[in-house]
Amino acid sequence: MTNKIGESLSKNVEDYLKALFYLTIEKQEAQAGTNQLADHMGLAPASVNGMLKKLRIKGLVDYEKYGKLELTEAGKTIAIRLVRRHRLWETFLHNHMNFEWEEVHEVAEQLEHIRSAKLIEELDRFLGFPERDPHGSIIPGSDGDYRVVSTVPLSEMHPGERCRLVSVKDGSAAFLKYVSQIGLALSSVIEVVERREFDDSIQIAYNDRKENVSRKFAENVFVSRVKNEE
């Protein structure tokens, strides 16, 4: 059933399923509803509600009007497949086609809708079965296995704590370019030096340099804590 449904879905429907996967599984928003989905996709709540009705009829989404949203098992399977294709294409573009990490998302958004299973499995093999994409996000396995890695936003770290940059929430070209311009990259070890009460900005130290970053920036960078002796 899932395969037949997956083969007949439009790009628009697939985009909805991927957005729901991000909100309900990756971001783990317990109360993700129509308004949160509309905000995430930049659409009117009324339009989103109309699409959700169609997805419920197809057996891909469970929800009550303006209530909590959940992917069904069939919907989750299709969403994971999309996320896997997207992140493998991002990795290919970054590693082999000279795309910077802020450039890969838009092109991968187009390539993810190619449904050839053989193409994706051979792409995975060619890339050496990577576990993370250029932004640090987990690439689901070919068997549909997906694990959520425990991370926290940089904004939750306190002065004196050290952490490692694992992934970024904001995938926009402008944000990723800024991250690169200030000399941060995946796996960079960061120490929180100071928090400024006035505007909640943070001074961080890394790679023998210091930088002042805004709260908005810190909320979009995800890290894992490291021990001070590491």
Image (spheres, rainbow, N blue to C red):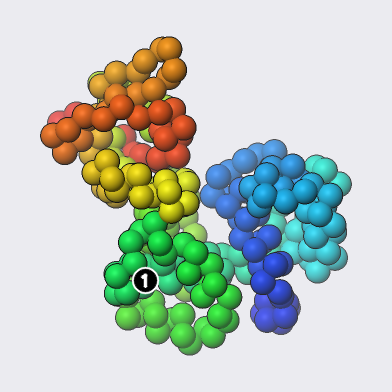
Q: Is residue 91 above or below residue 159?
A: below
Task: Tell me if residue 143 can be seen.
Answer: no
Residue 14 placement (x, y as % from top left): 66, 67
Camera-side residue: 140 or 166?
Answer: 166
43 relative to 113, above or below: above
Please state the horizontal and vertical placement of residue 131, each as a whole percent of the image.
36, 63
Q: Residue at x 51, y 75 (%)?
A: 111
The residue to which callout 1 is attached is 93
Identified at 67% across, 49% down, the residue is: 42
Rendered location of residue 55, percent (x, y): 79, 63
Q: Position of residue 23 (x, y in %)?
A: 61, 48
Which of the two residues, 216 or 115, is positioned nearer the viewer here? 216
Which amino acid, mark 1? Answer: Leu
Q: Quadrant of the N terminus?
A: bottom right
* Res. 181 in view: yes
Q: Quadrant of residue 141?
A: bottom left
User: Viewed as shown, does residue 43 lie left or right of 202?
Assistant: right
Query: In percent of the image, x 33 and y 61: which residue is there?
Result: 100
Q: Which of the 4 image quarters holds residue 133?
A: bottom left
218 and 100: which is toward the camera:
100
